[in-house]
Amino acid sequence: EDQVTQSPEALRLQEGESSSLNCSYTVSGLRGLFWYRQDPGKGPEFLFTLYSAGEEKEKERLKATLTKKESFLHITAPKPEDSATYLCAVQITGTASKLTFGTGTRLQVTL
Amino acid sequence: DAMVIQNPRYQVTQFGKPVTLSCSQTLNHNVMYWYQQKSSQAPKLLFHYYDKDFNNEADTPDNFQSRRPNTSFCFLDIRSPGLGDAAMYLCATSRIYNEQFFGPGTRLTVL
């Protein structure tokens, strides 16, 4: 069965304290892996797409990487405005455009 | 700006009283999706349209129906809402195989 697991469930960081969020997946075939940010009461906001092992994408303080079994979202020197839930989703070959989501990592960055 | 719009943002209905949620997009994407998201859970795909082709998830209750009268609009009908249907309903759009863009969501309360 296709599975996406994110860890930790919740993470509290101080401003400037870098860390990584993990998304591990077990799927029959990966077409792409997507990262989203979701603020409370809002829809997910697209961050990155990764297609192949070794690929990396960066945006401001965020960097996403992909291996054959997992993806990491690295947050460098986070700020309070980075506080949100970060969702990982996979697109599986043979399932058209469908996404299978993990349950997310709830990130809180404090001063 | 191109976007995904959902109306209303908040909907309160009574147990068993039909409700319709709407979604429109200016992105001209050919795929539209409806997700249900409950508190602290991953978004759960209910169905999606590829152009006019409707694709229902196997575990989507019959109580949920959808219409897509044209490329820009999509509706979610809940025929007889139960207390368990209280959730955030998210609409998303994409080009096939590409990243999905989400609307702000409709928060449904069932009394």
Image (tube, coloured by chain):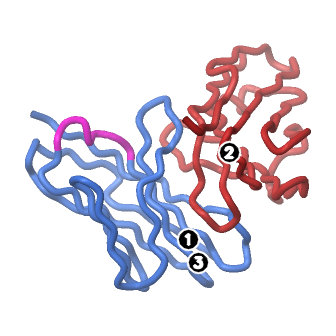
Chain colours: A blue, B red
Q: Are marks 2 and 3 in contact (CB under 8 Å)?
A: no
Q: CA distance from mark 2 to mark 3?
A: 21 Å
Q: Quadrant of the C terminus of chain B?
A: top right
Q: Provide the residue designation for mark 1.
A: A3
Q: Is residue A24 left or right of residue A89?
A: left
Reply yes or no: does residue A26 show up in magenta: no
Rendering coords of residue A11 (x, y %): 25, 49
Q: Residue at the location (73% across, 78% down)?
A: A94
Q: Which residue range is magenta in the image?
A: A79-85
User: Is A77 situated above or below B15?
Assistant: below
Secondary structure at badge 3 equals: strand
Q: CA distance from mark 1 to mark 2?
A: 18 Å
Q: CA distance from mark 3 to mark 1?
A: 14 Å
Chain ID of residue with mark 2: B
Q: Is residue B52 left or right of residue A88?
A: right
Q: Quadrant of the N terminus of chain B?
A: top right
Q: Give the mark nearer the N terminus: 3 vs 1.
A: 1
Inspect the image, locate mark 2, and give the three-letter code of the amino acid beneath it: Tyr
User: Is A11 situated above or below A64?
Assistant: above
Query: Which mark identifies residue B33?
Result: none
Secondary structure at badge 1 equals: strand
Q: Provide the residue designation for mark 3.
A: A31
Inspect the image, locate mark 1, and give the three-letter code of the amino acid beneath it: Gln
Are the residues under marks 1 and 2 on the same chain? Answer: no
Viewer-side label of 3, 1: 3
Chain ID of residue with mark 3: A
Q: Is residue B21 left or right of residue B89?
A: right
Chain ID of residue with mark 1: A
Label 3: how many Cα within 10 Å (few below 14, some 14–19, many 20+): some
Q: Provide the residue designation for mark 2.
A: B35
